[in-house]
Image (spheres, grey):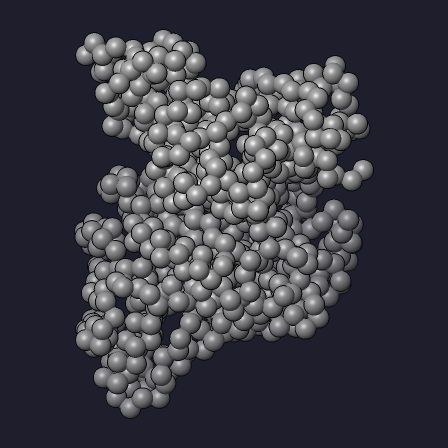
Amino acid sequence: MADNLQMWTDLGMDVDKHDALCQVLPTAFGDVYLSQENRPEGMGFYDFVVADIHGIRPSELIEAQKNGRKVFGTFCVYVPDEVVIAADGIVSGLCGGSQFWVEGGEKVLPKSTCPLIKASVGARLDRTCPFFRIADMYVGETTCDGKKKAYEILGEDVPMYIMDLPQMKREKDIVKWAEEIKDFAAKVEEFTGNKITVEKLNEAIHTINEKRKALARIYETRKSDVIPISGKDALLVMQIAFFDDPARCAEMANKLADECEQRVKDGVSVFPAGTKRIMLTGTPLAIPNWKLHHIIETSGAAVVCEEMCTGTRYFENLVEEDLGSLDEQYMALSKRYMKNNCACFTPNDARIDDIVRLAKEYNVDGVIDTNLKFCCLYDTERRNVERALNEAGIPVLGIETDYADSDAEQLRTRIEAFVEMLG
Amino acid sequence: MPEKNNLKYYILFDTNTHGFAMQALLKEEGIPSRIAPAPRAIQGELTCGMSLMIEPENIGDVRRVLEEKKPRYHAVRSLEGQINPHRDRYC
Amino acid sequence: MGFIGIDIGSTCAKTIVIDENSAIVYKDVCPTGWSSVDTANDIRVRLADAGHVIGEDPCVATGYGRVSIPYADKTITEITCHCAGAIELFGYRDMVVVDIGGQDTKIIEVAGGMVRNFWMNDKCSAGTGRFLEVMANTLSVSPDQLTALAANGSDTSISSMCTVFAESEVISLIGRGESKENIAFAVVDSIVRKVSSQAGRVNMSAQPVVLTGGLCDSEYIRKALSKELGTEVETNPDARYAGAIGAATFAKKIKR
């Protein structure tokens, strides 16, 4: 594993600075994850990935690059992985979820930028994350103003391609997104030197659909009265899904789902009976952001669903398979991706419907609506979320937080009080 | 108060392959182990890496297996107070 | 037998003991200090001096320092305890509790004797006792003196909600020769407006509104808050003990 050091040096990383992150990660992971009892055995794979998070997958990606493959770094669940995979490229998530990177981002961004953007920019510019070094091209999308302007800064340092996501969901917007996907496909073909064919795209669509189905299976088991997997563990699976090879991701998720299904049959729960069931809604929790889940699950409640990009938004809805032309396929992709309900759209009633539907499907006792500080889109949408949940008779707690530890105490008080309130 | 002592043993490895082989071996022998990122305090010259975490009640069995089967590993170390769910230190 | 409730706030630690009839038989308030271990020990000794032995009498801890009371049988958040304490003190089962604490302000909507909803300010001292303390310090008066001065002031305002910026605003008001009364008025006005905006989502006029926390003694604060919220705010001399009283009522439910 001393090889990692060589790899990080070769990637031009700031190895000393990066070391500070390597120091805190095992402790945080131990406190949050290894303190849990009776976890599914299938979590061993994910523990292993985290144990060497900046070693194993990066070295696989570098191997692939040596064989001429290109790595595309993405920031958002709207960028269609299928297109990249059809051109034999690799997709890797790039969202930063650590306070460690925030300071680096604040050197070039206003402080009043959301921590996810600050961390992502900091990870690149401070050279403290291998994934940000490895990606040959970054693919951005216009989901918020903070990101749009941050891409201009990143674009000075790395090849950057931006997809223009519509902000409404009219028929013509779906057509427009299909065109954007087509343009992106042309860019991917040019960058990889590989042609995207109908067959290859169908294969890629199938691969990603299988990954979605596998992740959905795990979530399905969380609807049960018996809670076979903790929220933290499910979150980790989702977070790693953004980085892993899609076929392996599906394989591992299916294995874990098998185990969770068996646990449901056998009545094996990771929480005592009567533990309050919480759904988290709102902004994404990029790896290694485990704060909220951990606080909730050490305050007498369990997280049973995440209505987030690192949650249901990542796997709900499938792309139609086996279409006969690229144009039909791009349209099918657009239709699926445009079903995602991000707060950047207006109006966004479908997200409110999703939240109420999921709260019922997962039989939750309460909802915690969280938003990353300075994300005005989700913050503003909270009003509609709260109103709809109030009407449905589902208690809701609104929380605004960032990646810092400093508000952990206040969050504990609020979350414990909320759990006490649920009775 | 959280268990301050909370002693755990960690088996360290030079490569993941050895770690997985060890995990499989211990499983065969019926000895529980959990994959954990190797705590920095005992990692020495190794970088961010994998370890197997062993509960104190099982360390005797582990040592016997290490003795008998001679699997490849770097070292066994013990450490206290590594896991504290109420520390509220994230990363 | 007594039932002990301890509320470790950011500024003061409040201790209450009630008897089987829920009558208060002991009350004590002391500064929280910088060492929660010392504070916890101190409280234990004082309770013992008054004949209430930890380990015999059930004890519930609340407040942000609740986890620092190692001898508590149980910890419950201050939200739930303030609700229970306010029910004891004011007798309403439906009301809004406004608790202005040392480092946070809570608005608790109580329905049918239970917490229905609550709002807390973010990690910021605007609209809290801490804000008042900092400003009193800048004016070289005590917090009590500040609220008394405010009653005679008028027509001055502080625009910033942030304690740090507001402090410099106060300093420039002093530099401009504004009277202490007017500056004190502006400080209280700022707190009251902040609390009111936090309570914006609750229907205040339909139910009683009660004030708890360390500022409950100030008639001027009560009046200013009533004016801003558009409804008569009630308080009680023991309202600073609301959290501890609530904790003590939960201690009664502990089975030995």
Residue at image position (63%, 30%) is C245
Residue at image position (24%, 43%) is A109
Vertical relation: C133 (above or below) A359: above
Q: Relative to A383, is C81 on the left or the right? A: right
Q: Position of residue C117 (x, y in %)?
A: 49, 46
Q: Relative to A174, is A270 on the left or the right? A: right
Residue at image position (31%, 45%) is A374
Q: Position of residue A219 (x, y in %)?
A: 52, 68
Vertical relation: A207 (above or below) A296: below
Residue at image position (57%, 47%) is C112
Vertical relation: A118 (above or below) C75: below
- Can you tell which quarter of the image residue C173 is in? top left
Q: Is residue C181 visible?
A: yes
Q: Is residue A84 visible?
A: no
Residue with the most extreme bottom position = A324
Q: Position of residue A132 (x, y in %)?
A: 33, 54
- Can you tell which quarter of the image residue A83 is in? bottom left
Q: Position of residue A150 (x, y in %)?
A: 23, 50
Q: Of C80 and A102, which appears nearest the observer?
A: C80
Q: Of A396 and A403, which appears nearest the observer?
A: A396
